[in-house]
Image (tube, rainbow, N blue to C red):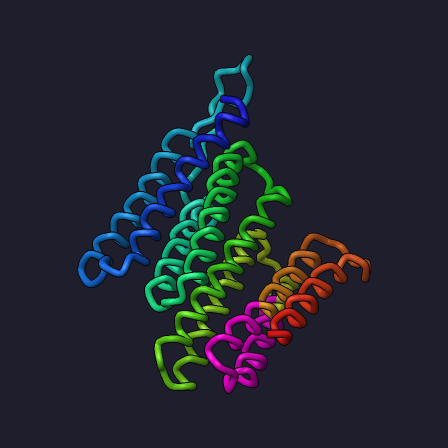
């Protein structure tokens, strides 16, 4: 199957969440219908995951050989199973608690585009059994960033106490940083130290930024989360030049300036 056909097929699949999410924001789509729609969307995502694994988990090592390489579920658990479910769940909850039409439509467009990249990357990942390519890390970094913002923003909108908001958002940061650790397949002592420092930074910034309103707080935390996982990726990939750390910092500063201007 050519790359163009693969992209076309994954684009069609990525339209399914679009249909479900558009139904969510309809004023008449409430109550039990919302729960049913969320379950249908979850079932569609799960079906795609199962079908993709069933079709592509067996690969011939060579057209001149009968040797077949197989993928175990645990090898692709976090990247090919947890990531799409996490992204769908986070964006679905976000759309449920927010009522701003423009923000909802932007979220849906961003979600569909991310799902398209994620589906295409998962499909391509079955061709890379023994390595994680750079594009794979970029896509999963984007997935975790969007999921982090959606989850933190949703928690901020639920009206919980500051203490509960801090605890839940800290747990979200912990799990998504751990997800990045697994995606990078880094389990050394050095990676553990980087993880602890990153999580500690999220705890400190989360504590001091907590008094901000429900709109500013998720954005600020997301900018810091992006900066940490970007620097983390640079460090774990073995780059030590200062210039390699500048692009994420400049992008974070640009995002901060845009946020402050509002």
Most extreme residue toward the left is 32
Q: Is residue 181 positioned above or below 170 on the image?
A: above
**Foreground of the two, 46 or 127:** 46
Q: Is residue 136 positioned above or below 64 on the image?
A: below
Was residue 151 drawn as part of the magenta stretch in this picture? Answer: no
**Foreground of the two, 248 or 260:** 260
On screen, residue 261 versus residue 139, left or right, reads right
Most extreme residue toward the top is 64
Was residue 203 drawn as part of the magenta stretch in this picture? Answer: yes
Residue in view at x 60 percent, y 63 percent: 226
**Foreground of the two, 217 or 73:** 217
Q: Position of residue 11 (x, y in %)?
A: 45, 36
Residue in view at x 48 percent, y 16 percent: 66
Q: Look at the magenta stretch and give its main secondary structure.
A: helix
Image quadrant where residue 55 sits: top left
Q: Position of residue 24 (x, y in %)?
A: 30, 56
Q: Position of residue 131 (x, y in %)?
A: 60, 40
Residue in view at x 49 percent, y 46 percent: 113
Residue in view at x 58 percent, y 81 percent: 204
Q: Position of residue 144 (x, y in %)?
A: 51, 58
> Which quadrant: the C terminus?
bottom right
Q: Which residues are magenta?
A: 195-222
Q: Is residue 235 positioned above or below 18 on the image?
A: below
Q: How many marks?
A: 0
On screen, residue 107 versus residue 250, left or right, reads left
């Amino acid at each position: 199957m050519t790359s163009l056909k693969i992209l076309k097929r994954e684009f069609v699949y990525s339209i399914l969440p679009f249909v479900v999410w558009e139904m969510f924001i309809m004023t008449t789509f409430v109550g039990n219908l919302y729960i049913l729609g969320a379950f249908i969307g979850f079932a569609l995502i799960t079906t795609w995951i199962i079908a993709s694994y069933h079709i592509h988990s067996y690969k011939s090592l060579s057209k001149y050989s009968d040797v077949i390489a197989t993928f175990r579920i645990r090898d692709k658990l976090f990247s090919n199973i947890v990531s799409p479910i996490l992204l769908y769940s986070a964006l679905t909850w976000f759309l449920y608690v927010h009522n701003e039409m423009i923000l909802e439509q932007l979220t849906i467009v961003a979600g569909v585009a991310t799902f398209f990249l994620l589906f295409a990357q998962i499909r391509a990942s079955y061709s890379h059994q023994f390595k994680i390519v750079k594009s794979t890390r970029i896509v999963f970094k984007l997935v975790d960033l969007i999921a982090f913002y959606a989850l933190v923003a949703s928690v901020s909108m639920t009206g919980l106490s500051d203490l509960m908001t801090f605890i839940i958002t800290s747990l979200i940061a912990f799990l998504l940083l751990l997800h990045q650790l697994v995606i990078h397949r880094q389990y050394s002592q050095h990676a553990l130290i980087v993880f602890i420092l990153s999580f500690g930074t999220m705890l400190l910034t989360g504590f001091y930024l907590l008094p901000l309103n429900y709109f500013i707080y998720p954005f600020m935390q997301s900018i810091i989360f992006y900066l940490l996982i970007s620097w983390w990726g640079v460090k774990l990939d073995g780059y030590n030049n200062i210039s390699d750390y500048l692009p994420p910092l400049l992008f974070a500063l640009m995002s901060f300036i845009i946020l402050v201007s509002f």
